[in-house]
Amino acid sequence: MSISLYAASVPVFKQMLKALSDVLNKAEAHASAKNIDANALLQARLYPDMFALVRQVQIAVDFAKGVSARLAGVEVPSYPDTEQSFADLQALLAKALGFIDSLTPAQIDGQEGREIVLRPGTPKESRLDAQKYLLHYGLPQFFFHVTTSYDILRHNGVEVGKRDYMGSY
């Protein structure tokens, strides 16, 4: 049985980005209800050498849109990463979801052998076929940053659980 690259990517990215949006809504409501400066959550991190929440969300978006675009053979949209508020992050997620939703199964399925080049022209350049890129690189990276975003908020008292993390499927 072969895998549908589309089914293993676009719907998964959409589910998790929508869930992340909902988690961020809960975080914003938590900050408001507890009279916490929203920036305290937006700049929170799990450990000093890790990225803050804002950057974790930006990177999750980067992987969702980047992986999807590369699988479809289209240009990766460039977003400036200037988000500083919950509203900015929600707008970023909406923009990414709009892009991802524009991709069709016909653009992605059957491209398992397409060569994906990461960090071209650098000493870290690597070449992977599309299936390996998705399953062994793209999805793990994406889930790391979504999970870390969730963990930062949970660690800071936002009442979220597994159902919030998973979203609707």
Image (tube, rainbow, N blue to C red):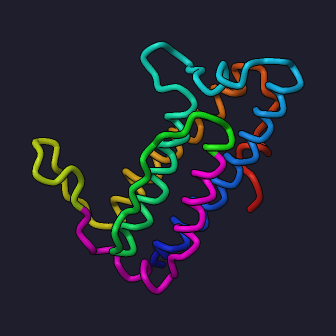
| Above or below 14: residue 91 | above
| Above or below 105: residue 141 | above
**Location of residue 88 by image quarter:** top right
The residue depicted at 54 percent of the width and 39 percent of the height is 83
| Above or below 6: residue 138 | above
Report the residue that reaches farthest toward the right: 33
> What is the tally of numbered marks visible in this picture?
0
The residue depicted at 51 percent of the width and 82 percent of the height is 105
Task: Give the magenta-colored segment's residue range.
Answer: 90-116
**Location of residue 68 by image quarter:** bottom left
- In the depicted view, which residue is nearer to us: 9 or 149? 149
Magenta stretch: includes residue 121: no
- In the depicted view, which residue is nearer to us: 130 or 18? 18
Q: Is residue 17 left or right of residue 137?
A: right
The residue depicted at 10 percent of the width and 42 percent of the height is 123
**Image location (x, y in percent) of residue 124:** 16, 43
**Image location (x, y in percent) of residue 46:** 56, 19
Quadrant (top left, top right, bottom left, bottom right) of the C terminus: bottom right
Q: Is residue 54 left or right of residue 130?
A: right
Magenta stretch: includes residue 106: yes
**Image location (x, y in percent) of residue 56:** 52, 35
Report the residue that reaches farthest toward the top: 48
**Image location (x, y in percent) of residue 2:** 45, 77
Report the residue that reaches farthest toward the bottom: 106
The residue depicted at 76 percent of the width and 32 percent of the height is 27
Q: Is residue 92 left or right of residue 76?
A: right
